[in-house]
Amino acid sequence: GLRSLHDASPPADRLFDEILSWIEEHLPDPDLAPDAIAAAHHVSTRYLHKIFSRHDVTVAGYVRARRLELVRRDLGDPANAMEPVSALARRRGIVDPSYLSKAFRSRFRVSPREYRARLVGS
């Protein structure tokens, strides 16, 4: 039937939103992979990649960006001042410290430790 004007988003976009919420809940899982995400939403991995490419982002790229954003937020939180960077990263699903360092630096132009030091030093 005809959809109302209020319900204008195509099903693929609604699915995209659902997938983003699901990913958010599962970020702490280091094994979060496209095939697991696809399976949880009863779509093929190929279709999953297609949905993401429509939004000009890759699945892995989105997951990485969200994790780094959360690590960055955690580093800026005074409540976490005594927590090692690696522990904060692990909570967000990043278990490899050298990967964290490279990915964080390429995204934010500073290392996680430098980022934290700047905030604490100010």
Image: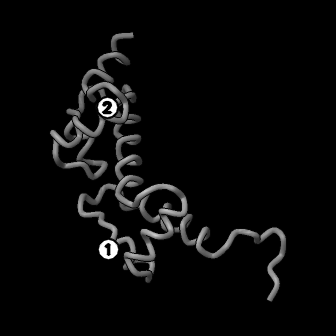
Q: Is residue 88 left or right of residue 18?
A: left
In the rendered structure, find residue 80 and report the number of the disc placed on it: 2
The answer to whether residue 73 is above or below residue 96 is above
What residue is shown with label 1? 35
Q: Secondary structure at mark 1?
A: helix
Q: Secondary structure at mark 2?
A: helix
Measure the alpha-carbon separation of dots 1 and 2.
33 Å
The answer to whether residue 5 is above or below residue 95 is below
Task: Residue at the far bottom: name it.
Answer: 1
Q: Which amino acid lies under the numbered mark 2 shown in the image of this protein?
A: Asn
Q: Are marks 1 and 2 in contact (CB under 8 Å)?
A: no
Q: In the rendered image, which quarter is residue 89 located in? A: top left
Q: Is residue 39 left or right of residue 114?
A: right
Q: Which amino acid lies under the numbered mark 1 shown in the image of this protein?
A: Asp
| Residue in view at x 47 percent, y 70 percent | 50
Q: Earlier in the sequence, mark 1 or mark 2?
A: 1
